[in-house]
Amino acid sequence: VFLTVSFAAFSFSLFAQTPKNTPRTSLTLEYGAHRIGKRTDQMMETWRNYGLGQFIHWGVYALTGGHWDGEYYSGAAEWIRSWDKMPKDAYDQLYKSFDPKNYEPKAWAKQAKEMGAKYMIITTKHHDGFSLWPSKYTDYDVTNSPYGNDIIGPLVEAYDAEGIDVYLYFSVMDWSQPGYRVSLETEEDRTAYEDFKAFTRNQLIELLELYPSAKGLWFDGTWDEAWKEQAVFADELEKEMRAMIPGLIIGSRFRPDDYGNRHFDSNGDLMGDYEQGWERKLPNTYEDTKGNDWDAVMTVPENQWGYHSDWRGHVKSSYELIEMLVKSVSLDGNFVLNFGPDGQGNIRSEEAKLAKEIGDWMKVNQKAIYSCGYLNWQKQDWGYYTQSREDGKIYMVVFNQPLDGKLRVKTADKVILDKVYPLENPGMILTPELIQKNEYFIPVIMDQKWTSPYVIVVESSSTDEDKNGGFQKAK
Ligand SMILES: C[C@@H]1O/C(=N\OC(=O)Nc2ccccc2)[C@@H](O)[C@H](O)[C@@H]1O
């Protein structure tokens, strides 16, 4: 008996699964997430309701156009300095040719307005360290280029004037700085890195002092081991910056926690105000978002942020980008489309065309985007649902019209459809055909051959199922 029992106990212990929903091991973290759940203040509500943003990657790398000495660089153009065929001293002299005669911040801002962007993220300094603003802390900045003037200031003013909120991209990784380190192996490393940390703080405080209308910072270049050891410094710096601009929005890519984890701390809780991990990719389900706020930043080609004169491989169409935008909003995220102006300050024609096409679609359908988010109805093949956070209206954004002309809709429980109509033609009332409880067919809008996604509005209300199984409107 003893052997049997002990064998049974032994085998059970081998195969026992931890029971479901056991609480995560909660480590005591000093520098992990400082907040569980979404921020609910007004500035974050405004951020959550943007829907569409514009990323701008601009710097001296744009002068190379992804080529050097007649050779094509297949990497991301803003990384060309890291290319073995790019002589580092040659790259580091490029700023002496930076004189963008065609830089017109007001035109950029107008174009972004036409596209329907509600916020814009500008690279104040990318990994190469060239600062596009007059910085007291480095000579490697725009004032020492032939252009000589501040790039960032006029851009902030132009976008503010168009009512587009400005966010400042800042790369912690800075190849130009003597104190920058990938990792801290020696005492010399550590001493040098202390100078680098002070420099980094100085530039960030300087940016917020110079451009106080900025609504947030979009950090990058924080993956190095050296930075991952700076939980204390990063936390103090983040607190200092947040104190300078109340409500400042900072994502998950800035701080490392006590164990060097970014984006999610060692307990799995989100660091910062929103998740910044969706870079050139989107979540597929609401579960993928973990119920957090998030943004997805997207390139037009597969992977070019800075200007590359020769885009190769797949270049996304406005149709694809509109679908990514709608999918992002349908999953409670913002979609940020990247622009890479060339070395003279021109917005390239492909991007101008996309801005126009997306803008034309937004002019007709923006109600399904702005201040909209996730709806817990079953996802259907014809497209995406969004729901207005303001008036609860539901939008069916149709990308794949069924051949039988019927859009299947399966609502959540205890919902009735009061009124269904095309966003573009509220007078055309569509009559749902009841399939079964909570399930309907909505007739598609067949009166024209659709070449771009269209939107159907659903006004619904919740009901309490009455005794005899019928439905009556809730009081
Ligand atoms: C927006 C992009 O951000 C970057 N890098 O992003 C990431 O490293 N993204 C990342 C890395 C690991 C996991 C998830 C996202 C930069 O190197 C690039 O030049 C561009 O500025």
Image (spheres, rainbow, N blue to C red):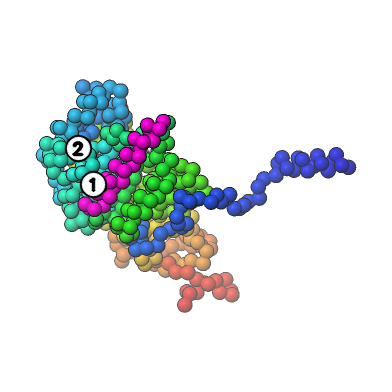
Q: Which residues are magenta?
A: 186-211
Compared to residue 383, the image places residue 224 above or below, namely above
- 61 or 373, nearer to the observer: 61
Name, please, the residue furthest toward the bottom: 475
Write down the residue under mark 2. Answer: 139
**Residue at image x 45%, y 57%?**
35
Asked whether residue 345 appears in the rendered view, the answer is no
- 412 or 20, nearer to the observer: 20
Name, please, the residue furthest toward the right: 1
Quarter of the image holding residue 395? bottom left
What element does badge 1 sit on?
helix
Quarter of the image holding residue 446? bottom left
Residue type at mark 1: give it: Ala
**Residue at image x 42%, y 40%?**
228
Write down the residue under mark 1. Answer: 355
The reply to whether callout 2 and callout 1 are in contact (CB within 8 Å) is no
Residue type at mark 2: give it: Asp
**Residue at image x 30%, y 26%?**
83
